[in-house]
Structures are given as structure tokens and as C-alpha cells.
Amino acid sequence: FFGLSFENNLQPKVQWLKDVGMDRSQLAKAIAKRPRILKASLEETLKPTVQLLIDLGMDRSHVAKALAACPQLFGYSLNDNLKPTVRWLGALGLDDSQVAKAIMKFPQFLGLNLETNLKPIVHWLLGLGVDDSQLAKAIATCPQLFGLSLENNLKPIVQWLKQLG
């Protein structure tokens, strides 16, 4: 970071993040959690990530809150992670507002791996008899569920609940 020019690199990024809607405390929180955002490309990384969230219908205050809570969003590949996850959610039947709702509740959701986190849990839930509309509602209202381990958390909890009768 010491090699970065304040006027040409740091100041424009900090100002842009403020313009996105981040207040001083959100900005400090985001930079403390992920200082590398100050090295990220404004045009290739920061702006496209924010635009994706706005395109889903998130207003600037929700975008700022999500980025402050999970500045790692700026570290996820737009083409390899963020967009494929959003497309996959759409294919499951979620509309943009439901996807935005999930991100607002659990911004880390977009960083979960499709193959190792999201798809196995969805297939498991469908196997339990959850229908498509219930699945969409679960994703939108409780996206944190998908951050849990299927084998170490979800299956044992369901098995325990079944044993209770």
C-alpha cells in the first residue's frame, strides 16, 4: 500500500466508495476487513461489482451496508463467481428482488461456492420434499442456511428433529 499514490489511486477509490453511499464508519470497517480493496481496479472490479448489486434492485444504502459487512465481495470474480451465482439463483426461480433480499441479509452468500456449498444443499432440500417456491423463500429469507455445513450442521439437525417426532 505504501507504493500506491494517494492522489492517483487511494483518494479516488475512497471518494468513489463514499459516493456509492458508504459512510465513514462503513468505509473504515470495509478497509479494515479487506485493505486490498484499495488496490483493486476501480473500473474492472469495484464498479462492476457495485453495478451488479444495483442491477438486482439494491439501493445505494443497502449496497453500502452489504459491502461494509462483506468487502470480500470485491475479491470475488465477477465472471467466475458473482454472475454465475446470480444466474443460477434465477434458474431456481428467484427473481432479482429475492436475490437482492438474500444478499442484504447475508452478503457472504454470493461468495459461497456453487458446486460445494449451494448446489448440494439445494439438492438435499429438494430431496426432503421442499418445493421450488419454498426453496426460493428459504434462500431469500434465510440465506445463512447455505453457509452451514450440510454434513456437520444441516443433516444432523434435521435428523435430530425427525427423532423428536
Image: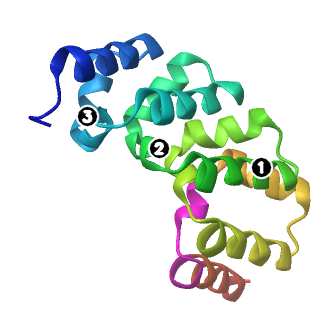
Left/right placement of residue 110 relative to residue 71 reads right
Q: CA distance from mark 1 to mark 2?
A: 17 Å
Residue denoted by label 3: 31
Please provide the residue range marked out in magenta: 144-153
Q: In the picture, which quadrant includes the C terminus?
A: bottom right
Residue 148: image location, x then y, percent: 53, 68
Tag 1's secondary structure? helix
- Circles 1 and 2, Cβ within 8 Å, touching? The answer is no
Left/right placement of residue 29 relative to residue 68 reads left
Q: Residue drawn 71% across and 47% down?
A: 86
- Circles 2 and 3, Cβ within 8 Å, touching? The answer is no
Q: Residue drawn 90% across and 59% down?
A: 132
Decide: is 105 above or below 157: above
Q: Amino acid at mark 1?
A: Arg
Q: Name the mark on residue 87.
A: 1
Q: Could you tell me how many numbered marks the image carries? A: 3
Assess whether residue 87 is covered by the magenta stretch.
no
Categorize mark 3 by other alpha carbons within 10 Å: few (<14), some (14-19), many (20+): some
Q: Name the mark on residue 146.
A: none
Residue 154: image location, x then y, percent: 60, 76
Categorize mark 1 by other alpha carbons within 10 Å: few (<14), some (14-19), many (20+): some
